[in-house]
Structures are given as C-alpha cells and as structure tokens.
Image: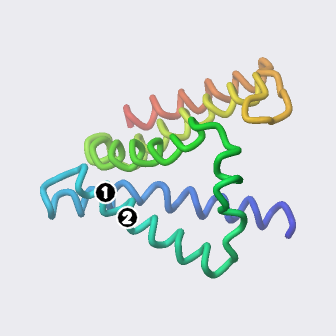
C-alpha cells in the first residue's frame, strides 16, 4: 500500500475519533451516566476486537507470550477507558473542535516525548526546534478554536 493510502486511512480514523466522544455523550445522556456509557462503549469495542481476532487469526495468545510483556503494558486498556470516559464528559462542554484539537495537541506532545527519548523501542528522534515549533502551532490552533 502506498503511503498516501495510509495517510488517508489515518485521516479517516481521526474523523472517527472526533465523533466517538459525541456519540458516547448521547448514550451518557440517555442512560444518565458518563461512566456507564464508557463501559458500554468499551464492551462494544471488546466484542468488535474479538470478532476481528477471530476473522484475522488470533496470533500468539499463549500464556508464555502474554507473560513476556511487562505488566504495565496492560494499562493501555485503562488509558482507553480514561479517554472514552473523559471524552464523554469534556467534548460536550468544549465542543468537538476544541476537544479534538486539544487531544491532538496532547497526542503530539506525547509522541514528541516518545520519539525524543526513544521509548517503547522506537528510534530516538530528537525534539528539534522545528518539531517544537510544530507543537506550538497546534497548541495555538487549540487557543484559536477556543476563542473562535
């Protein structure tokens, strides 16, 4: 697949991430609980993942393979829970654009730190002045979206 196909798919995923908190907020209003909505959303995500594993092949889910991963890696699921529940609460207050811009700014800050320190086995990519300027532009975009 050419790089542009991957970039287009990433943009499509970004659109989905932008509307997911709003969909969950509708559910939260209907059932009267942000955390209940997060739980339902994550249950549906789990069921979807099970179907994808069954369709695509399970990989190595052996006890040995799972035990070879540091315990804290499994906290990624908790990160997803916090994101879903946070989006349910925050996005209706800030609006979709400001929420998404702030999330992207946070993602880019996190990605810059991961690259700079070579975390999770990635090659080190120093936080150059141009990269930091790019972060500043995204943060400025969040401010402009909030004031707009």
Residue at the image position 85 percent from the left and 33 percent from the top: 123
Identify the residue at image location x=59%, y=75%: 52
Q: CA distance from mark 2 to mark 1?
A: 6 Å
SS for callout 2? helix
The image position of residue 95, as x and y in percent, is 33, 46
Left or right, residue 124 beside residue 84: right
Left or right for 18, reference 8: left
Please tell me how crowded label 2 is: few (under 14), some (14-19), or many (20+) other residues with Cα within 10 Å: few
Q: Residue furthest bottom?
A: 55
Q: Identify the residue at the far left of this view.
A: 32
Q: Which residue is drawn at the image coordinates 75% and 26% (left, top)?
A: 131
Residue 42, percent from left and from top: 39, 59
To which residue does mark 1 refer? 39
Which residue lies at the image location 70% right of the left edge and 22% below the top edge?
A: 132
Quadrant position of residue 12: bottom right
Residue 76 percent coordinates (x, y): 53, 44
Query: In this image, 49 relative to 10: left or right?
Result: left
Measured along the vertical axis of the image, is residue 103 above or below residue 59? above
State yes or no: discs 2 and 1 in contact (Cβ < 8 Å): yes
Q: Is residue 123 above or below residue 28?
A: above
Residue 57 falls in which quadrant of the image?
bottom right
Looking at the figure, which quarter contains the C terminus? top left
For residue 43, which numbered disc appears in the image?
2
Q: How is the image coloured?
A: rainbow
Q: Which residue, as the protein is rendered here, is positioned at the far top?
A: 129
Q: Nearer the viewer, residue 136 or 54?
A: 54
Identify whether 130 is placed above or below 147: above
Residue 113 locus on image (x, y percent): 68, 25
Under circle 1, the secondary element is helix
Question: Which part of the image, by quadrant, shows the N terminus?
Answer: bottom right
What is the number of callouts on the image? 2
């Amino acid at each position: 697949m050419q790089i542009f196909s991957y970039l287009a798919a990433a943009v499509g995923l970004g659109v989905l991430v932008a509307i997911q908190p709003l969909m969950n907020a509708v559910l939260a209003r209907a059932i009267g609980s942000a955390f209940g909505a997060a739980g339902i959303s994550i249950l549906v995500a789990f069921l979807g993942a099970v179907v994808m594993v069954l369709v695509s092949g399970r990989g190595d889910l052996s006890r040995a393979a799972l035990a070879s991963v540091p315990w804290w890696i499994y906290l990624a699921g908790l990160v997803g829970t916090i994101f879903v529940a946070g989006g349910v609460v925050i996005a209706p207050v800030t609006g979709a654009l400001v929420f998404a811009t702030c999330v992207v700014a946070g993602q880019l800050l996190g990605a810059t730190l991961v690259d700079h320190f070579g975390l999770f086995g990635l090659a080190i990519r120093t936080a150059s002045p141009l990269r930091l300027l790019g972060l500043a532009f995204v943060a400025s975009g969040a401010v402009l979206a909030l004031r707009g």
